[in-house]
Image (cartoon, rainbow, N blue to C red):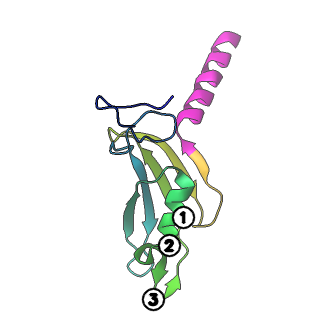
Amino acid sequence: MMKVDLNGTPIRSYGNTGTPITMNMGGFEILYREPICGGNRRSFHVTDTMLNAVAEFNTLEHTSMSEGKPFATPLTITRHDVFGNATHRWNMDGRYSVPRLVGGTSTERRSRNRYNRNRRRA
């Protein structure tokens, strides 16, 4: 069943979440090192998945090219929700490597389970 507003017009939403398209859904902050000056840089992407944010990061000229050549840089990707809270964090050794989850929901659950298991043994 399609959701409608008070006037009877269909509401456009993100999939089956019911969130209107006009509502901010958060985004991904990508931290990387600039090769010439060596300074830290920040890039923010509002996409649906982390891999789409990295793909968008790789296509932008100012984040992927240095003196006309692509540069290798380690990436730290942080997911921010609508309120600005960091919910997940991934590290990548290079722009095309496999992302590793280093902070977020599944790591919190894993440490909580380990704590409960060790507490029961004592």
Three-letter code for the amino acid on which mark 1 is drawn: Ala
- Please state the horizontal and vertical placement of residue 18, each as a whole percent of the image: 44, 33
Residue 122 visible in the snapshot: no
Which residue is outermost to the left? 7
Three-letter code for the amino acid on which mark 2 is drawn: Thr
Image position of 64 with respect to 82: above or below: below
Q: Residue at left 33%, top 42%?
A: 23
The residue pinned by badge 1 equals: 55
- Magenta stretch prevailing secondary structure: helix
- Please state the horizontal and vertical placement of residue 75, each as a whole percent of the image: 51, 61
What crowding class fits label 1: few (fewer than 14 Cα within 10 Å), some (14-19), or many (20 or more)? Answer: few
State yes or no: residue 121 in magenta. Answer: yes
Q: Mark 2 near mark 3, Cβ–Cβ under 8 Å?
A: no
The residue pinned by badge 3 equals: 67
The residue pinned by badge 2 equals: 59
Q: Residue at left 38%, top 66%?
A: 40
As helix, strand or loop, the secondary structure at mark 1 comes to helix
Q: Residue at left 50%, top 72%?
A: 59
Q: Mark 1 near mark 2, Cβ–Cβ under 8 Å?
A: yes
As helix, strand or loop, the secondary structure at mark 3 comes to loop
Three-letter code for the amino acid on which mark 3 is drawn: Glu
First to last magenta residue range: 102-122
Residue 63 visible in the snapshot: yes
